[in-house]
Amino acid sequence: MDLGGRSAQRLGFGRSLGQVYVAIYLSPKPLCLQELVDRLGISKGNASMSVRQLEAWGAVRRIWQRGDRRDYYEANVDFRALLRQTLAGFILPRIESAGRQIQDVETELETMGAGIEDGDFLKQRVRRLRDVQRKLAKILPFVERVLK
């Protein structure tokens, strides 16, 4: 479980999010929040927030257990679908947003003109960011098609 937590942290997410996913993924049966709390030693609120986030991403799904009022969760093991969804819903919008922000910085640098200290240096660095952003914007739709 700890590996999942460390991996999630490296990707910029909360440790418990990774631990919750790994616990659900490695479980042969669906788990409820209390089981996650007991196995991972995290608060029920933390487990609940993690499960909701994972559910929103499509990484886990809610399962109904006959005769039990609690919600249970099982992992979505279709990694291709998860990667496609992550690209479409998380990465591509951020790449597009970065492109708009870079454009704003380029416009600002042009407006300020020669009056800015190290202006040529800054323009060069922003141009490099723009090149990387454009390449990513071109590559990611191809990656998305490969995952179909």
Image (cartoon, rainbow, N blue to C red):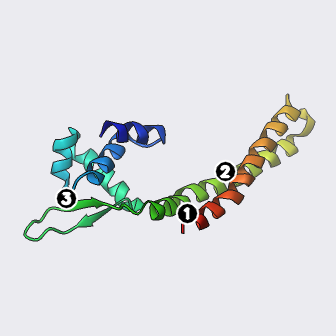
Image quadrant in which you'd find residue 54: bottom left
Whether residues under marks 2 and 3 lie with C-beta atoms below 8 angstroms apart, the answer is no
Give the mark, 1 or 3, whose residue is nearer the N terminus.
Answer: 3
Q: In which quadrant is the C terminus drawn?
A: bottom right
Measuring from the top left, give residue 50's x and y in whole percent. Answer: 32, 50
Residue beneath disc 3: 29
What amino acid is labelled 1 in the image?
Answer: Ala
Label 3 packing within 10 angstroms: few (<14), some (14-19), many (20+): few
Residue lying at the far left in this picture: please name it. 67
Going by the image, does 28 lie left or right of 83?
left
- Label 1 crowding class (10 Å Cα cut-off): few <14, some 14-19, many 20+? some
Q: Residue at x 46, y 65 (%)?
A: 81
Distance CA(mark 1)–CA(mark 3): 30 Å
Q: Badge 2: how crowded within 10 Å, few (<14), some, or many (20+)?
A: some
Can residue 40 be spotted in the picture?
A: yes
Q: Amino acid at mark 2?
A: Ala
Pointer 2 residue: 98
- Residue 124 position in % (x across, y down): 84, 38
Closer to viewer: mark 2 or mark 1: 1
| Label ID, residue 96 | none
Would you place residue 18 above or below residue 140 in this image? above
Location of the N terminus by quadrant is top left
Q: Position of residue 11 (x, y in %)?
A: 48, 42
> Is 85 or 95 nearer to us in this picture?
85
User: Callout 1: helix, strand or loop?
Assistant: helix
Q: Is residue 126 left or right of residue 7?
A: right
Furthest residue to the right? Answer: 114
Q: Which mark is residue 88?
A: 1
Q: Residue at x 88, y 34 (%)?
A: 120
Image point (14%, 62%), residue name: 70
